[in-house]
Image (spheres, helix red, strand yellow):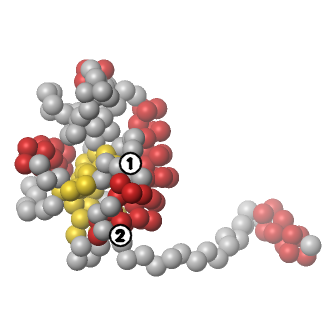
Amino acid sequence: MKNDKKIAKQKSKGVVKIPNVTVPKLDFTFRSQYHWLEHYEDGQRYSNHLKSAEEFSAKIKDLIENVIPEIYDHYTDIFEKRNGSKIGFKHTHLIDDASKSALVKKVAQAVTKQKFGDVDWWQIGKTQGVRIFGFYQSSNKTFYPVFIDWNHMIYPSEKHNNLDLKSLKYPD
């Protein structure tokens, strides 16, 4: 009861005590070094534009609240054991197809305005939703996202990718 009065008094003064929280020490980093959320389209094969600001907002919210925390929780399974599909990351794998690798490198360079040397490109994706493309450095257990493929244009599905690229207007 005495503690409740103290908290109420602090709140009335505009002061709220933040509880002590123990943050686990992680040896993995999701490092946003590149402007990986930049929009890009090549006018032919690729676009990561969306239909609206509302769609963009909802997807960013899911990315921040769900996808990235789950990557932290399961990075060992994803990158080291390479069995992401067993933990719900069905569309997570190294890019080992030469034509896909060339397209990934082209989009990465266009989005970031940088050239990438010899890196092993990864696609990170769950059953539905966003696909994040980047590379993983095992020496420091760091994943560097380089671009995002909202519309699954790198690995399209005829069943699900009947998009009219001209309808994707956000941002203009």
- Eyeballing the image, is 12 above or below 17? above
Mark on residue 54?
A: none
Give how far across and how far down residue 166 sits, in percent.
Answer: 25, 20
Which residue is identified by label 2?
Answer: 76
Q: Quadrant of residue 99?
A: top left
Q: Earlier in the sequence, mark 1 or mark 2?
A: 2
Q: Quadrant of residue 57?
A: top left
Count how many numbered circles sit on residues in the image: 2
Residue flagged by tag 2: what amino acid is it?
Thr
Given residues 28 and 109, the one toward you in this image is 28
On the question of residue 143 being in view, the answer is no
- Eyeballing the image, is 145 above or below 155? below
The C terminus - image quarter: top left
Mark 1 nearby-residue class (10 Å; few <14, some 14–19, many ≥20)? some
Q: Residue at x 30, y 68 (%)?
A: 81
Give how far across and how far down residue 152 sits, in percent.
Answer: 28, 37
Which residue is identified by label 1?
Answer: 126
Residue flagged by tag 1: what amino acid is it?
Lys
Q: Residue at x 42, y 52 (%)?
A: 88
Give how far across and how far down residue 90 sits, in percent.
Answer: 35, 49
Judging from the image, what secondary structure is the residue with disc 2 in?
helix
Please give left or right for residue 8 compared with residue 115 in the image.
right
Judging from the image, what secondary structure is the residue with disc 1 in?
loop
- Eyeballing the image, is 43 above or below 108? above
Given residues 158 and 103, the one toward you in this image is 158
Query: Which residue is at the far right?
Result: 1
Please give left or right for residue 166 compared with residue 42 in the image.
right
Give how far across and how far down residue 65 sits, in percent.
Answer: 50, 52
On the question of residue 73 being in view, the answer is yes
